[in-house]
Image (cartoon, coloured by chain):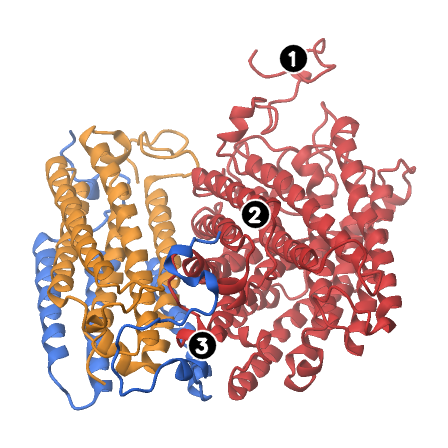
Chain colours: A orange, B blue, C red
Amino acid sequence: MAAIADAHGHGHDEALHHQFEDMDQQNEAYLVGMWTFLVTEVMFFGTLFIIYTLYRSMYQMDWYLAHEALNIPMGGVNTIILLISSFTVAVAVRSAQRRERNLVLWNLGITLVCAFAFLGIKGVEYMEKFQHNLYPGPEFGRHPEYLHGAAPNFAQLYYGLYFGMTGLHAVHVIVGIIVIAYLWVKWFLNAKNVTLDYVPTEMVGLYWHFVDLVWIFLFPLMYLMPKP
Amino acid sequence: MATTPLSKAAGHGGHHEVKFNHLFGNLLALMALMGITIWASYVNFGNSTINNLIALLIASVKACLVIWIFMGVKFATPLTRLWVAVGFIVFILMFGILGDYATRRFEPTAGWEMNRPNDGGTALPREWPPAKRPEQGAENFRPRL
Amino acid sequence: MSSIPIEKGLENSSPHQREPANYLTVDWSLKSWLTTGDHKRIGIMYLISISFFFLLGGISAGLIRYELTSPAGRVLESETYNKIFSAHGILMIFTFLVVAIPAVFGNFLLPLMIGARDLAFPRLNLMSWYLYMIGGTLILGGMINGGVDSGWTFYVPYSSMYANSNIALVIVGIFFGGFSSITTGINFIVTTHKMRAPGMTWFRLPLFVWAMYATSVVIILGTPVVAITLLLIVFERVFQLPIFSPELGGDPVLFQHLFWFYSHPAVYIMILPAFGIQSELIANFARKRIFGYHFVAFSTLAIAGLGFLVWGHHMFISSQSMYQGIVFSLISFLVAVPSAVKIFNWTATLYKGNIRLTSPMIYALSFIGLFTVGGLTGLFLGSLGTNVHLTNTYFIVAHFHYVMVGGSLTAFLGALHYWWPKMTGRLYNESLAKWNAVLVFVGFNLTFFPQFVMGWMGMPRRYHYYYFAPEYQPYHLMSTAGASVLALGLIIPGFYLLKSLANGPKASANPWGAHGLEWETASPPVTTNFEQTPIVMDEVYDFDPVLEHEQAQARKALEPTGYEGYEPGALAEPKKDESDLGGKS
């Protein structure tokens, strides 16, 4: 398979690690490993979705009323931002396969910008919630007009899950930012382990797509509730 | 800088590249679906269950598009596809937890009804939630590790 | 070649007598150990760490047993007693049982058994160990800072709202431990799929590898659930986010659902590797092919799969729906079937086998008996009616100790003795080890069998004092007496195993005459495991009955040396080739 293989069958591929026989095996191993990790993340977030489903089915009206305090345009803009970032990271992966360093740098850069924008809008939303005393705790409901008539205790459950799920998602976005920035720096410095082999870029891309995937489900569930 | 794309380089087994137009088309499709979701949430389909189903369905389609094209499962090995399937199947399995609640009458703790004043449903500022323990005020709260 | 460290006593020998550097001797510095990617070294590091946590868990067990010898307690306050049994549970489950066999033996043996040079992700493996150490340190810190008193199950709303102990700290430690588990699982799965040697098809794999694979699948799918569930308790305590709070409409039973959704598969994480070890020990010491290899392999997968469907049997009395209870009870009975299939297959392997009663074999045979008792008593607990009487009594305690200690720990000890020559290149005192195995068996039964009787009679678990029912005291006394014997049986191996490191005779590549790729390479192996990638051409447990008979005759003619469990060629001889008795040619 490798035209430049030596007698032991190892290619002179500098990106090949010692425990693998050839790049094919290495790439497949890395990708299967990344997917396995994403499966764990599915189970991680999935639990929260189960809790959400249960409580929403029990307290539909109160949750519908409570959710009206959420800013749908902001959520929609966040969704668009994440979709664009997903697109750019996919283009970055493609460019990495084609070893087009400039395109990789540009696309990863746009992804980073989108990620920061997402966090910024999320931060604005959170600040608004804190100011309106919508964070669960003894101060909850001090501005009852923002509860829109929901029972305060069930509304606290809603906001508990809202902050829990979007907060956990935001933590994953932050981790994604760190990883993508690290990758960007590696590409900028022309480091061999990312330029010779596209798989690290693809692995980061997979992670970022997963982050987008969670948001695709979070957005309609949290922001777009129909009236029961 | 080598000019041979990795997909065609020796020893890399020809990993498929996704065409740029496919990626962009995927993005447009996702945006369109998002628009439909928002529109559908404002339309009353008569039954909130149907609304919920439609929202979930559209979200599932979007997820499938992201997984299939952006994440490259279209070109992935059967092992990868198996893992994706297993992950979602076990996630669906967890919904079996809800079977418990579907087959018994769950009521919130009785206390909340008593604690919630029965005055027609206004949510005037009161001590809410009622402080059961003296340390429950905001000034006394400390994260307990 | 001058950089190879020379063994003591060999400085004056000629170069061709010096051994090549194996994975232990290739670099003695601490830094090389702490930055290693070698799966064998990481396995050894795990062994040291889990032994430490096991010791702590054992001390807390000793305290519990001592405390219970008197109906009014002895030296502890009730709250402290709660903290001690919680510590025992947390340490034993999260830092020992879940980790022990996969992280020590899985790490060490998986690449050897499939003919690979290393695991798929060596650096991830190292990170796994560091995550484990961080998690263990945090748990330890929580214990030192006062411990938790909620039990290892952390039921809400006590742990989220009312407990005043270090719950958040310990949970964060468990969280890190969970991620260590997950990364190990990812590594094993990818390694098993992608890095088998040429000719090593799935059905030529040793059954230990099948067990590791199934365990890893369970780890991947279950651990994140408990990670987030426990993290939600931390959210409730630290960030005031209400999730399970009943005052606000939440449901504490939901916590139990989510907790047991992992924790039941967790018990399969603890026992499936033990099953794998069992298959190895029984096949190699009965000198016979495993009866029904395919059945054993598929039953491993069946247990892993069905194990996800039975979590509710821990919650029969929790106010969960009766109808769900019926379903869970039914599936719990079904999940006993694959385990029974394995027991039958091992017993059938023993039939007409050339059984050699070495110390690992004694552990393996005890496993069959003890695990059967534990498994059968699980059926008592799985049926709804009897569960109402037996739940939260000592019957449950005895049941899970039979499967966990009588099963998992026994298999761990068997594996430790079986692969010790491979891992360290030294032989330990076999006759002492045999007596120790019997001691463990006797001590274990004396500890836990009275607990079945006690539980049946109604003694509740997790009770600090029982002065209102002093009729249980004789059983508690028997149990504590047995615990002392068991403790002795668990401490003694530390001594003779460590002594073997100091001055035990060196082992050859295959001191047991066993089959398997790991026995084809030197003891201890070189860093890259094999000089050349092996090519596998036949199934793994291919014992030739004629050859076995000849060996049995040959063994009878030997003089006793104290090492007679081992093969005649067990001792390493520098100039000769490895013993050609046993092993694949």
Q: Do the residues at pointers 1 and 2 share their chain?
A: yes
Is A186 on the left or on the right of B107, as rendered?
A: left
The answer to whether residue A135 is left or right of residue C254 is left
Q: Is residue A177 left or right of residue C159?
A: left
- Chain name for mark 3: B
Neighbourhood count class around disc 2 (C-alpha, 10 Å): few under 14, some 14–19, many 20 upward: many
| Tag shown at residue C142 | 2
- Please report, as a chain letter, where disc 2 is located: C
For disc 1, the neighbor class at 10 Å (few under 14, some 14 to 19, many from 20) is few
Q: Mark 3 belongs to which amino acid?
A: Ile
Q: Is residue C23 visible?
A: yes
Give the spatial CA distance, label 2 vs label 3: 32 Å
**Secondary structure category for the residue under label 2:** helix
At 79% across and 71% down in the image, what residue appears?
C452
Q: Nearer the viewer, mark 1 or mark 2?
A: 2
Judging from the image, what secondary structure is the residue with disc 1 in?
Answer: helix
Residue closer to the observer: C226 or C104: C226
Can see residue B17? no
Q: Amino acid at mark 1?
A: Pro
Dot 1 or dot 2: first in sequence order is 1
Q: Is residue C109 above or below residue C79?
A: above
Point out the image quarter for the N terminus of chain C: top right
Q: Are marks 2 and 3 on the same chain?
A: no
Location of mark 1 (residue): C15
Q: Check disc 2 and give the amino acid type.
A: Gly
Check contact, mark 1 vs mark 3: CB within 8 A: no
Q: Nearer the viewer, mark 2 or mark 3?
A: 2
Name the chain letter of the residue that bears numbered label 1: C
**Relative to B139, does residue A100 appear above or below in the rendering?**
above
- The residue tagged 3 is B97
Image position of C338 with respect to C127: above or below: below
